Image (spheres, rainbow, N blue to C red):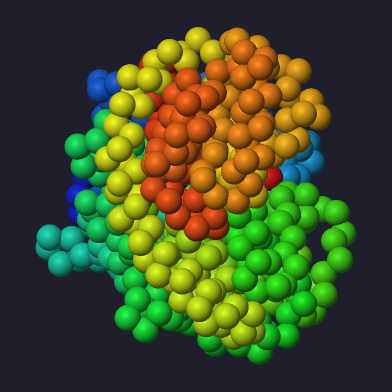
Amino acid sequence: MCGIVGYLGDEQAYPILIKGLHRLEYRGYDSAGVALITGRKDLAVYKSKGKVAALEAACEDKDTTGTLGIAHTRWATHGEPNASNAHPHYSESRNLALVHNGIIENYKSLRAELEKNGMTFQSETDTEVLVQLIEYMMGTHKCDLYNAVQLALKNVIGAYAIAILEKSHPDQLICARKASPLVIGVGKSKSGRTEFYVGSDATPIIGYTNQVVYLNDEEVAYMDRSGKMEIANLNNVKVTPQMVTLQMNLDELEKGGYAHFMLKEIWEQPNALRNCIRGRLNIEQKDVNLSGVIDNKERFLNCRRIIICACGTSWHSALIGKYFIEEACHIPVEVEYASEFRYRNPVIYKDDIVIAVSQSGETADTLAAIQLAKDNGAFVYGICNVIGSSIARATDSGTYLHVGPEIGVASTKAFTGQVITLSLLGLAIAKERKTLTKEMYELLIEELCNIPEKMEWTLANNKDIDQFARQFTYCRNFLYLGRGYNYPLALEGALKLKEISYIHAEGYPAAEMKHGPIALVDHEMPVVVIAPKRGMYEKVVSNIQEIKSRNGKIISVVTADDTVVRGMSDYCFTIPDTRDCFVPLLAAIPLQLLSYYVAIARGLNVDQPRNLAKSVTVE
Ligand code: G6P
């Protein structure tokens, strides 16, 4: 949901900002813009509709010199995606330019107030209201920009991460945040002087410096060319910046020879999951150790219920986690859409554990859901991928996925990373609560260790999906069916197809098909059935029979030695045998590849599907 970049230092800012925008394009890509204090000390703003490449083209004949600038890639919330609604926005006097990620909820009343005071507006955005409000504060309070930002933000309801330039002070950069992420990188230029980088996440900063400061809610940062950095809250009380060292490297942010990030991330899964289990799962001793559980043992022993809050793909992995934790730990688990949970007065007990599952760690609804849980005294546990993200910092404890940065908008390796992390969590809780026999505990651990290798087998043995996927280019609907642990995977398979190929798809529990979706089945309807030789195999075989007798096309995911379902299918993806609870980890791969190749056959941009953004920092 919008990406922000900023730079202040000795280097030319424009190339750094553009490179940063490309890395943040996963956050939104309907328009982009840049503001620079140019060599002539002008405050120049250039913007254009479309992706960052369009902005670059628009800037070709412009003055892009200067060593201080801010930039933005947008996912529209207020006002259609066009150049005038794109950021940065000038204030009326053009002395200020501002970029913003988030939503100013009370922008209408603020705008009305400012208009009453004679201010005029160029766009329909909430962001322009913010920059105008800051300028208004500078005028009425006769204060500098740093103070005016604090004063203005006190009047704002909503979410913001902002960066601002001031023409009359061409050596300073100011930024602030509340409920939208913002990271400041502190580096050294070639001449040894301090330079500053700003990003919605650390990706635009990697490669320049590994020293970062994460701004907290309602903090405003001031940086200038002398190397001074100061952070204060909205009451101008100084805060000591906490420097953190980033662990991410540049290679993780590149496509590494793959056509798309999504394809790279699908193929990365075996190694990503090895990284995820490393240090947590000890194969020699057949044991699981999660510090988040060990350090909070009493909480996990005494809890009577777990509530998992998540959105999108993370909600699907949470459902798989529910099945596993209930089975392994005998604790009731509820899975909630964070957006529903936060607004429906849920019953939360003090001995509940609320788990937030989020790849980005920035999803606004999930963040609000855990805040509600905390306010009600529950213990809150985070399962996030992005280190230092808002959710990771807002939770009482947690476990990182450690699957590396996920750039493709459609989540792949984070999904399997979440499933495996929730399994580790279930095993760690079961160990403390002694709810599994030693034999079963060890069997599950052994099998979890085999998963990366079995994923490699799955990738190597489903290589012709690209050829096969082409025949679905013109399909209008797909149905995905699964039972037990594979029902959430059916939901995820359908979501993947929708997200990147724009084909309508629905996931259903296989047995529920009879209560509605079967009416849709005809010779044009591909039905993807997850049918491993485990669990309720015979029942799934009967469901397939029901579809076949209505001429539906069967695409199945079967265990390698299966002959029955294979014989009934129009096409088969094969996976190695594994325990029921881990089938989704393997069966996810062919479903991800199917959606990828259908989208490619339709000529679509899989890394940047229309209308979607990877990090949803607005409600
Ligand atoms: C967006 C992304 C999805 C993701 C969802 C939740 O919709 O496009 O891929 O599953 O947000 O995001 P989170 O970062 O909280 O897992």
Say if residue 561 shows up in the picture: yes
Above or below, 6 relative to 226: above
- Residue 164, x across and y down, in percent: 47, 49
- Left or right: 492 in relation to 190: right
Residue drawn at the location 54% of the way across and 55% of the way down? 580
Q: Is residue 478 left or right of residue 174?
A: right
Q: Quadrant of residue 247?
A: bottom left
Asked if one can make out residue 185 in the rendered structure from this viewpoint, the answer is: no
Q: Please tell me which residue lies in front, 455 or 360.
A: 455
Q: Give the image location of residue 408, x and y in percent.
A: 40, 39
**Number of on-image labels:** 0
Q: The N terminus lies in which quarter of the figure?
A: top right
Residue name at image x 77 percent, y 29 percent: 514
Nearest the eye: 576 or 158: 576
Residue drawn 52% across and 82% down? 438
Q: Is residue 525 left or right of residue 56?
A: right
Whole-percent x and y of residue 179? 61, 57
Question: Where residue 161 sits: x, y (%)?
Answer: 54, 52
Viewer-closest of 552 and 62: 552
* Residue 568, above or below 387: above
Quadrant the C terminus occupies = top right
Q: Is residue 394 above or below residue 566?
A: below
Toward the viewer: 221 or 249? Answer: 249
Residue that appears at 56% across and 33% down: 529
Rendering quarter of residue 227: bottom left
